[in-house]
Image: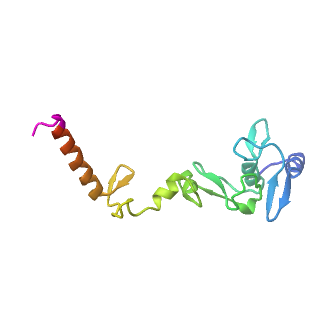
Amino acid sequence: MNDATTTEMARFHSKPKPFGDCLLWTGKLDRYGYGILHFRRATRKAHRVAMWLANRQIPEGHVVNHTCRHRSCVNPAHLNTMTPSQNSQRDSAGAGYVNSQKTHCKFGHLLDRKWGRQRYCSQCHKAKQQRLKAKWKAEGILKI
């Protein structure tokens, strides 16, 4: 349970304004569009303060995700916690999410091999190795 004072609660709740189901932060925003405020001698993200005021814990190593996709929303019903990896892949148009959904290379071959965290097609890889070997042999780099 939080130990917020009446003054802190009133100051926080004076900033959000309803917009559909969301409560959009009308105070200061950071350069990414997240609400920020000075709270208890530190600059904090408004959505994280909203979670704290709603007595919802943010586990260590987790981030707060906006299910409504509005970065300035501070409605606790629209906020949930997840790992940074889950957050970057959930409902995202980012490269990490897009590539994680691919199952085949651009030539239609199955992405069947893995090197570290990167997946690749063994057929295209084999063809590339053959092209390089032929090129190096023609250039005299490869002595076979």
Residue 83 horizontal side relative to residue 5, left or right: left
Give 38 or 97, whichever is nearer the viewer: 97
Q: Residue at x 9, y 40 (%)?
A: 144
Query: Is residue 1 at least partly visible in the picture?
Result: no
Give 102 or 15, whichever is nearer the viewer: 102
Q: Give the percent coordinates (x, y) of residue 96.
A: 50, 53
Furthest residue in direction front, as rendered: 138
Q: Which residues are magenta?
A: 139-144
The quadrant holding residue 108 is bottom left
Query: Is residue 90 at least partly visible in the picture?
Result: yes
Give 45 or 136, whichever is nearer the viewer: 136
| Rendered-image quadrant of the N terminus | bottom right
Q: Residue at x 58, y 57 (%)?
A: 92
Q: Residue at x 47, y 62 (%)?
A: 101
Residue 111 horizontal side relative to residue 47, left or right: left
- Please tell me whether residue 29 belongs to the stretch shown in magenta: no
Q: Give the percent coordinates (x, y) of residue 42.
A: 75, 36
